[in-house]
Image (tube, grey):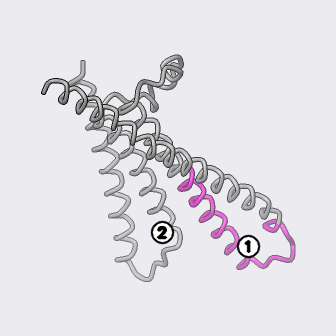
Amino acid sequence: MKAVAKIFETILWDSRFIVLAAVIASLASSLAMFYIATADAFFMISHLGEYISSDLTQEARSALRSATVTHVVEIVDGYLLATILLIFSLGLYELFIGKIEKAEQYATSSNVLLIESLDDLKSRLAKVILMILIVKFFEFAIAMKFHNALDLLYLAAGIALIGLALYLSYAGEDSDDKQKH
């Protein structure tokens, strides 16, 4: 019976390598998002020459400026999503497969890339997701049409809630740091 338990435990322990599928898929998705965001940035920058054209009316220039700012926000959003996928990939690897010794050699890796627990991974991902939500809010705020004072009040309330969310996320981080020490 002990031999069967040992075989079962070995199979169970080795089953953690199935996580490599998620690690590889997340890494590939991250690379794809970095590529897409970089291509978007390249094409947006290549079209900026139109902005100084003397043939452009003030209304057309304003529309181009608004579209460019929206594209910049979308590019930032793409890079943030790529970063989430990269952190997720590295975190899953460290939690289920093994430590990334190369990352431990660099002082900057402790800021983001060294994941010690599932809560640590969730916390890091939550902060990046919060940043994506802030960028999306900014994108919608740019396109928002203000018809009355209530619309401005809604925008102000949204900004206040974003500030509160940022405050609470960093206040929670400070309390976690105090508990560790």
The part of the chain drawn in magenta is: 50-79
Which mark, by number, is residue 21? none
Return the x and y of residue 79 as percentages of the image width and height: 56, 50
How many badges with numbers are in the image? Answer: 2
- Identity, as a three-letter code, of the amino acid under mark 1: Arg
Quadrant into which the N terminus falls: top left
Label 1 residue SS: helix
> Callout 1 environment at 10 Å: few (<14), some (14 to 19), or many (20+)?
some
Label 2 residue SS: helix
Instruction: Please tell me which residue is depicted at 59% across the width and 65% down the height of the picture.
Output: 70
Which mark, by number, is residue 140? 2
Instruction: Please tell me which residue is depicted at 53% across the width and 49% down the height of the picture.
Output: 82
Question: On screen, 39 above or below 118?
Answer: below
Return the x and y of residue 155 as percentages of the image width and height: 39, 67
Q: Is residue 127 at least partly visible in the picture?
A: yes
In the rendered structure, does residue 56 fall within the stretch colored magenta? Answer: yes
- For the stretch drawn in magenta, the main secondary structure is helix
Return the x and y of residue 89 as percentages of the image width and height: 46, 41
Question: On screen, 156 above or below 177?
Answer: below
Residue at the limit of the structure toward the bottom, as seen here: 147
**CB atoms of marks 1 and 2 within 8 Å:** no
Instruction: Please tell me which residue is depicted at 35% across the width and 70% down the height of the picture.
Output: 154
Quadrant into which the C terminus falls: top left
Q: Nearest the camera: 115 or 157?
A: 115
Question: On screen, 53 above or below 160?
Answer: below
Q: Quadrant of residue 53?
A: bottom right
With 103 as the anchor, is 1 left or right in this view? left
Task: Please give the residue where the numbered disc 1 appears in the rendered image.
Answer: 61
Mark pair 1, 2: CA separation: 20 Å
Q: Earlier in the sequence, mark 1 or mark 2?
A: 1
- Identity, as a three-letter code, of the amino acid under mark 2: Phe
Return the x and y of residue 81 as percentages of the image width and height: 50, 52
